Image (cartoon, rainbow, N blue to C red):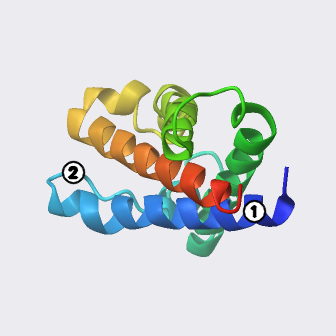
Amino acid sequence: MNTTKVIAAGITATAAMSIVAVMVAPMMGMPKMDFGTMLGTNNPMMAMPYMAGWMIHFVVGIVLTAVYASIFINKLSGSYAVRGIIFAMIPFVIAQSMMMPMMGNGFWSGGDMMAIMGSLIGHVVFGAVLGAVYAKGE
């Protein structure tokens, strides 16, 4: 595992997912997912500053990239982008089944299909960018 690549890929993939969640999803009729608000100011477990929510989001992205690079990259098949997408289904399921209820949004976003679809698209983008960026130079 290359730590520099983990950090670069984690930040890039999380930024791409964030752009989709905040700007693109609302244009497609899906709810805006502002991670600063969700993980920071409106966090029902422990409210904290808006920027702390964004920092948590990016740290989680880097940690997930480290897990992908150390465990999954060579266990999955397909192009590196496809491997990343397959891996990203793990945090997608965890987000919908555990994190959303903890944030007060209900199990699987309370059945809100547009919210679930937005989350799925965001995680697919995260995975594709993660896999492609981490693989640079491989």
Q: Residue at x 49, y 25 (%)?
A: 97
Give the residue at mark 1: 5
* Direction from residue 69 to residue 38 in the image, left or right: left
* Direction from residue 84 to residue 25 in the image, left or right: left
Q: Quadrant of the C terminus?
A: bottom right
Q: Residue at x 49, y 55 (%)?
A: 38
The answer to which quarter of the image holds residue 4 is bottom right
Which amino acid type is shown beneath numbered disc 1?
Lys
* Direction from residue 134 to residue 41 in the image, left or right: left
For the residues labelled 2 and 1, say whether their Cβ atoms are less than 8 Å apart.
no
- In the rendered image, residue 127, in percent from the top left (x then y), is placed at 51, 46
| Residue depth check, mark 2 versus mark 1: number of the one nearer the observer | 1
Q: Residue at x 25, y 33 (%)?
A: 112
In the displayed structure, would residue 53 be above or below residue 71? Answer: below
Q: Nearer the viewer, residue 38 or 54?
A: 54
Cα separation, mark 2 vs mark 1, equals 32 Å
Q: Nearer the viewer, residue 43 or 90?
A: 90
Q: Is residue 107 visible?
A: yes
Q: Nearer the viewer, residue 105 or 44?
A: 105
Give the residue at mark 2: 30
- In the rendered image, residue 45, in percent from the top left (x then y), is placed at 63, 45
- Secondary-structure class at tag 1: helix
In the displayed structure, would residue 90 be above or below residue 48? Answer: above
In the displayed structure, would residue 100 be above or below residue 47? Answer: above
- Secondary-structure class at tag 2: loop
- In the rendered image, residue 110, in percent from the top left (x then y), is placed at 32, 29
Which amino acid type is shown beneath numbered disc 2?
Met
The answer to which quarter of the image holds residue 53 is bottom right
